[in-house]
Image (cartoon, grey):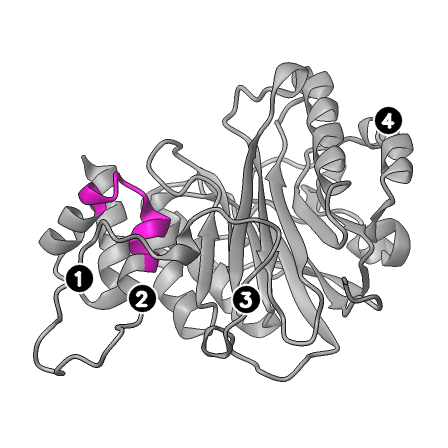
Amino acid sequence: SSIFTAAAEVCAQVDGLDLETAIEILQQLEGNIEATIAFLGKKEESAAPATKRSKRDPTDEPEQSKPSTNTVDVRNDDIIALDSPPSLKLLTWNIDGLCDSEDKLKARLGYVLEDIKTASPDIIMFQELTIFTIATLHPVLIRLGYSHPRFANSGLRCPYFTGLYSRYRLSVVDRYQFEAEARSNMMRDLFICAIAVPGWPVWHLAVGHLDSGKEVAATRVSQGKAVLQQMGGYEHVIFGGDTNLRVKEHSQLKPLMKSNGVNDAFELIGTADVKYTWDTNINDNLGFSGPRCRFDQLWLRNMSCAKMELVGTKRRVQGFPSDHFGVMVRVQKPDRVDA
């Protein structure tokens, strides 16, 4: 199918393969894009002659592409910066990968990349990734140093999904499916990774995209509660994503946020100029004006951050990069190191 071919093209770009070989490897790994990218990017155990590609078994999936426990094996050659940074920049952004013609979407993705290059976050939490958006974004993000991608739905089961790109090693902990009253009819879920930063305790990133629309408010609140319950199981964790929560719905989550020791980053450090992340009075991508919402949020448990700012606020010829503005903060190194 065209979607499978597009996925193979993404994988081929990682290691300079011809498309036929990439398709073969992707088929052997059952359409798992993440595993294929990890396999192709795996370093050789011994150096191979430059003029000839050494043979590798594509079914030998690298350990780093498999879900793991709450610990991460830190290897110096997997990390861009070896010094222990006092803080990191984290960006969450719904890039609206489902709308527009292919040409207009490609133009908007170019704007996304321009703004990422300018903002230079260390970690990017994406929502509404698709095979097409990854094919456009992935090669540039790798060149910019985001050498550790992870995807919530790493195969071809879902037409859109969330993902993480990081300058530090990531290890998948859980791909959590909303259940019971929180069950999504929009293929939304929660994606959790451990991140290894030199000199920091192991901490976690949770990326989510809650259901859209006023008619599913009860489901969305249940999903928010499920996110908070999951966060309660980790010592140091940050959730980021497009929550679609209205003010009244957010207030329903306050008791559970408090009992789980979770704080809303905006309520800690936000200012009026960064309040609205989906603002149709400024952003005209959708062709109407009026609603202004703080859909895109960052929640913290035993983590602190500073300097919240919006990304993607500049309009270009083809509009804004997305109908959502990205939210970026500077995450502080946790004070207490896990035993």
Residue 201 located left or right of residue 248: left
> Label 1 is placed on what type of residue?
Arg
Pinpoint residue 225: horizontal percent, then vertical percent.
76, 29
For the residues bearing labels 1 and 2, Cβ distance under 8 angstroms: yes
Apparent side of residue 148 relative to residue 7 in the rendered image (left or right): right
Q: Position of residue 125 (x, y in %)?
A: 58, 53
Query: Where is the N terminus found, in terms of image quarters?
Result: top left
| 3D distance between C-alphas at marks 3 and 1 | 34 Å
Q: Nearer the viewer, mark 4 or mark 3?
A: 4
N-terminal of the pair, mark 4 or mark 3, is 3
Q: Looking at the picture, how far across and down is residue 193, in whole percent?
A: 57, 51
Give the CA distance from mark 2 to mark 3.
26 Å
Residue occupying the point 83% across, 66% down: 336
Q: Secondary structure at mark 4?
A: helix
Q: Amino acid at mark 4?
A: Gln
Q: Residue 190 or 249: which is nearer the viewer?
A: 190
Asked which secondary structure carries label 3, the reply is helix
Query: Could you tell me residue 129's position as x and y percent?
Result: 45, 45
For marks 3 and 1, give the one nearer the viewer: 1
In reply to whether residue 30 is colored magenta, the answer given is yes
Which disc, if any, is residue 42? 2
Mark nearer the viewer, 4 or 1: 1
* Magenta residues (range): 26-38
Above or below, 203 against 1 in this view is below
Give the amino acid at mark 2.
Lys
Mark 1 secondary-structure assignment: loop
Instruction: Tell me which numbered mark, 3 or 1, is placed earlier along the sequence.
Output: 1
Q: Which label was assigned to residue 116? A: 3
Residue at coordinates 51% horizontally, 78% vertically from top-left?
76
